[in-house]
Amino acid sequence: MTTTSIERAVRRVIDDMHVNLGQEITIDDMARTAMFSKFHFTRIFRDVTGTSPGRFLSALRLQEAKRLLMETEFSVADISSQVGYSSVGTFSSRFKSCVGVSPSMFRELGGFASELEALDAASPTGTVLRGRIHLSPDRRPGYCFVGLFPKPVPQGRPARCLVLDSPGAFELRDIPEGTWHVLVHSVPYGAEDVPSGTADAQAVSVGHYGPVTADTDTLLLPADITLRPLAALDPPVLMALLDMRTAAMAAVAS
């Protein structure tokens, strides 16, 4: 089977997720839509998107919840039900874990975070990861968020992070021991007052580098990252964006 046909099957499943966000969707349902065995489907979905079908579906539900929080007056309980959660508590806990703030705070802050907090990651190694972010000619420049995550999915609190005022050189210091992914997302100047999850996806640029493994004896190679449009096969950017209208751009240390 060709790469194109595999991606087409995964895209069918993601389209079905979008249509049925409020319904129960099992892995068996997804595998039938893709026309693969459950085992084979789970493997190819992870290969294509970088995450499991269940985590991707959860991310889409939370992305829709972000939109509803910003664009409607529905209560948190109503939104929880609309995106497929039977428990408001479970929804609120998952939302805060992935986005960084509670649903009510996300709405209160207008879809942004007033500051970015890195994880209190254990076992810092003293290792530095340097690199450069490039913008392809068809992309509009803007502020760049650079984060170090344990999975290739931009959600939750990063182990290290910083915000650049434009694509270019970056440096993440004192990388914790472990295996990490460098994830970058950017929105064009003038669009930074539009919260993530509600902006035109085509305006968002993303980039990925890794996995990289750090320990006390590691000398990490420079990371070269080229930003590209956010695609349908990419997991949504769930974490609340730093409010660049009021916040100073600075490195965030744990």
Image (cartoon, rainbow, N blue to C red):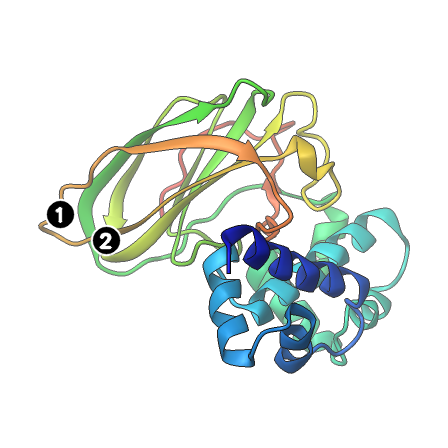
Image point (27%, 61%), residue name: 122
- Mark 1 secondary-structure assignment: loop
Image point (19%, 41%), residue name: 220
Is 155 above or below relative to 95? above
Indicate which disc residue 218 carries: 1
Seen as rendered, the residue at the extreme top is: 137
Q: Is residue 154 visible?
A: no
Image point (21%, 52%), residue name: 214
Is 182 above or below relative to 8? above
Is 188 above or below relative to 29? above
Q: Is residue 167 visible?
A: yes
The amino acid marked with disc number 1 is: Thr
Seen as rendered, the residue at the extreme left is: 217
The location of residue 111, given as percent across then percent down, is 71, 45
Q: Answer yes or no: do the residues labelled 2 and 1 have beta carbons within 8 Å?
A: yes
CA neighbours of label 2 inside 10 A, class few (<14), some (14 to 19), many (20+): some
Seen as rendered, the residue at the extreme right is: 73
The location of residue 154, given as percent across then percent down, is 51, 51
The location of residue 208, given as percent across then percent down, is 43, 42
CA neighbours of label 1 inside 10 A, class few (<14), some (14 to 19), many (20+): few
Image point (56%, 20%), residue name: 141
Q: Which residue is mark 2?
A: 213
The amino acid marked with disc number 2 is: Thr
Indicate which disc residue 208 carries: none
Side of 21 relative to 7 (left or right): right
Side of 210 relative to 68 (left or right): left
- Mark 2 secondary-structure assignment: strand
Seen as rendered, the residue at the extreme front is: 1
Residue 241 occupies quadrant: top right
